[in-house]
Image (spheres, helix red, strand yellow):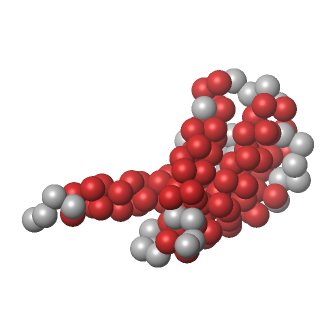
Amino acid sequence: MSDRVWPQRLLTGFYWFLAAEFLVGAVTKYWPGPTFFGPAYSIKFAEWGYPPDFRFVVATLELISAVMLVVPRRRFRFIAATTLVLVLTGAVTTHIVNHDPLHESFAAPTHLVIMALIALANWPA
């Protein structure tokens, strides 16, 4: 096996890992009751000042983006990453405005930076 195959496999695995994270995030937003992350997202969205059903919009964007992240085409990964940059910008802003504790606010900015780097790396030629 050539030395170039391993970095490509690691990168593919990283895309699959990120897709799995966003898939879990989407499923928990669709879930009607409490999740293993805490109260139901309908309650969280209402507490953040959004209509409770807005969680379905966010969940759908996350779900579609998760699927597009694992499609081995630069254009799909670019679209997925830029969509998630928009969603995560909203999430980071929401956490800042609502003064959420750090342990609840850490994932959004981390993933925002990762998605911005993925978008730049997959910028269409």
Q: Residue at x 57, y 65 (%)?
A: 123
Compared to residue 65, the image places residue 89 above or below, namely above
Left or right of residue 125, residue 73 in this image: left
* Whether residue 32 is visible: no
Q: Is residue 12 visible?
A: yes
Q: Residue at x 73, y 47 (%)?
A: 89
The quadrant of the image that shows the C terminus is bottom right
Question: Is residue 107 placed above or below 53 in the rendered structure?
Answer: above
Looking at the image, which is closer to me, 61 or 80? 80
In this rendering, the answer to whether 89 lies above or below 38 is below
Identify the image quadrant of the N terminus.
bottom left
Q: Residue at image x 52%, y 64%?
A: 122
Task: Point out the residue furthest to the front here.
Answer: 125
Residue 52, percent across and down? Answer: 83, 53
Could you tell me residue 24's position as x and y percent?
A: 53, 55
Residue 69: % across, % down: 50, 66
Q: Nearer the viewer, residue 114 or 27?
A: 114
**Depth check, front residue: 41 or 83:** 83
Question: Residue 80, located in which quarter of the rendered image?
Answer: bottom right
Q: Which quarter of the figure has residue 82?
A: bottom right
Side of 88 relative to 99 (left or right): left
**Residue at coordinates 35% horizontally, 57% vertically from top-left?**
11
- Residue 70 position in % (x across, y down): 45, 68
